[in-house]
Amino acid sequence: MSFERRDGRLYAEDVPLEDLAARFGTPLYVYSRAAIESAWQAYAAAFAEREHLICYAVKANGNLAVLATLARLGSGFDIVSQGELERVLAAGGDPARTVFSGVGKGEAEMARALEVGILAFNVESEGELHRLDAVARRLGQRAPVSLRVNPDVDAETHPYISTGLRENKFGIDIARAEAVYREAVTLPGIRVTGVDFHIGSQLTRIAPLAEALERTLGLVDRLAAAGIPLAHIDVGGGLGIRYRDEDPPAPAALAEALAPALAGRPQRLLLEPGRALVGDAGVLLTRVEYLKHDHRDFAIVDAGMNDLLRPALYDAWQAIEPVRERRGRSRCYDVVGPVCESADFLGRGRELAIAPGDVLAVRSAGAYGFVMSSQYNARRRAAEVLVDGGRAELVRARESWEDLWRGERIPG
Ligand SMILES: Cc1ncc(COP(=O)(O)O)c(C=O)c1O
Ligand SMILES: N[C@@H](CCCC[NH3+])C(=O)O
């Protein structure tokens, strides 16, 4: 574990978190390099038996230092925008190990991805396939394509992050996919290379993934029979982490569960984990501003929904702990931010012994934390720090006041 409590103080590797709050201010995201590395190694070891490529889902945490850490391990990347592609390139990531997902790819994004030579476009609709064909032909290229199929399985997760049901906007209905492949192989700007699915995020059961794979392999077999062999099978990401009492499968259990269905198949396996690699590798530090004891007990802290949106958006539960234990009476607090919304909470009904000035750590904030933050209420986005052993480095400075109006103009 890279975030541990010793003698009542919470550490990131060998650095006390309260020291980081004092040095860099709050709100502050803190990541542990060792935690990222060990999560990635565990994933890679789990799938070592077969030829595979881990394409880390950049959306989970796109900080350049995080991406560079993963690139150095040999990771590939799963991107959903040109912005994420530029980040991967800036961090030294390999475009030839990068897949491009997302339902709304623009022409310029496609052209840029073709220019740098990505591994595959995960194409999510026929309209996108035709647009990509046209863009590639204009550039005198053939775009490598894997169709993202929608296998219509219930991932059994929060409805906002479930993506593999027919009513979701993602992917091509698996029942129609064969026809789309048959057309794709006739398009001069398209080179068919694989198939892809991603059924949702924060998955705690393997069964829906195994079901999606089974349905997809049926398609792979029908395509092979039709003379359309595929070079890779991309099973997406989605493996959950333990925020509270969930019991998500480890990567090894996932690998074991998928192995029988994949046995003997020549395709390279692609995986797109995000949260499972970085979720537990980060915390959000925030300082208590006020304690207010009215109808309820409120701990008003200096981080809000603009810094960490998950509680407000999904009613998500993340552990909140003082970085230094304090003796004394505890109370049951709603931990709320300074933003003018009643949804601005980090946690509700938390038993805490705290005083104004104390620093709290919101755990498991390495994924979908900073990346989902905003400047709402004209709040500067938090700084980010990467800890490596006993060293802590500022890897993104807190925004300046001018950052709040960069690019704006007062006309006339
Ligand atoms: C296409 C795609 N791949 C991979 C991921 C990574 O998901 P997770 O962070 O749940 O592993 C997502 C997000 O859910 C996604 O949309
Ligand atoms: N943002 C979500 C995950 C979204 C996954 C994106 N496909 C979360 O915090 O849980």
Image: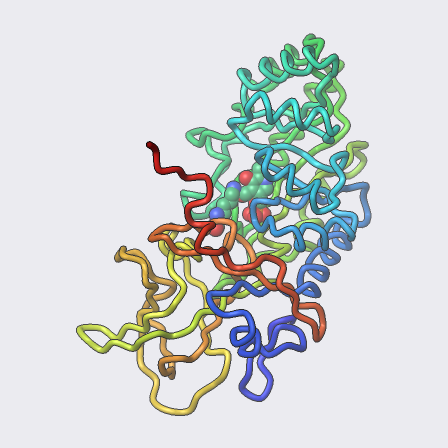
Q: Nearer the viewer, residue 129 or 33?
A: 33
Colouring method of the image: rainbow
Q: Residue at x 45, y 74 (%)?
A: 360
Q: Nearer the viewer, residue 181 or 350?
A: 350
Q: Residue at x 40, y 54 (%)?
A: 306
Looking at the rendering, which quadrant does residue 286 occupy? bottom left
In this orientation, does residue 208 appear? no
Marks counted in the figure total 0
> Where is residue 252 drawn, in percent x and y?
70, 55
In this orientation, does residue 22 appear? yes
Image height of 328 relative to 21, above or below = below
Looking at the rendering, the quadrant in which ligand 1 lies is top right
Q: Nearer the viewer, residue 181 or 360?
A: 360
Going by the picture, which residue comes out furthest to the front? 412
Looking at the rendering, which quadrant does residue 160 occupy? top left
> Where is residue 297 drawn, in percent x and y?
26, 75
> Where is residue 249 drawn, in percent x and y?
60, 56
> Where is residue 385 drawn, in percent x and y?
60, 64
Quadrant of the frame with the C terminus: top left
Image height of 363 relative to 373, above or below = below
Image height of 168 relative to 41, above or below = above
Q: Nearer the viewer, residue 26 or 248?
A: 26
Going by the picture, which residue comes out furthest to the left? 295
Q: Residue at x 36, y 52 (%)?
A: 378
Image height of 79 relative to 135, above or below = below
Q: Residue at x 68, y 50 (%)?
A: 67
Quadrant of the frame with the N terminus: bottom right
Going by the picture, which residue comes out furthest to the bottom? 328
In the picture provided, is 157 more to the left or to the right than 217? left
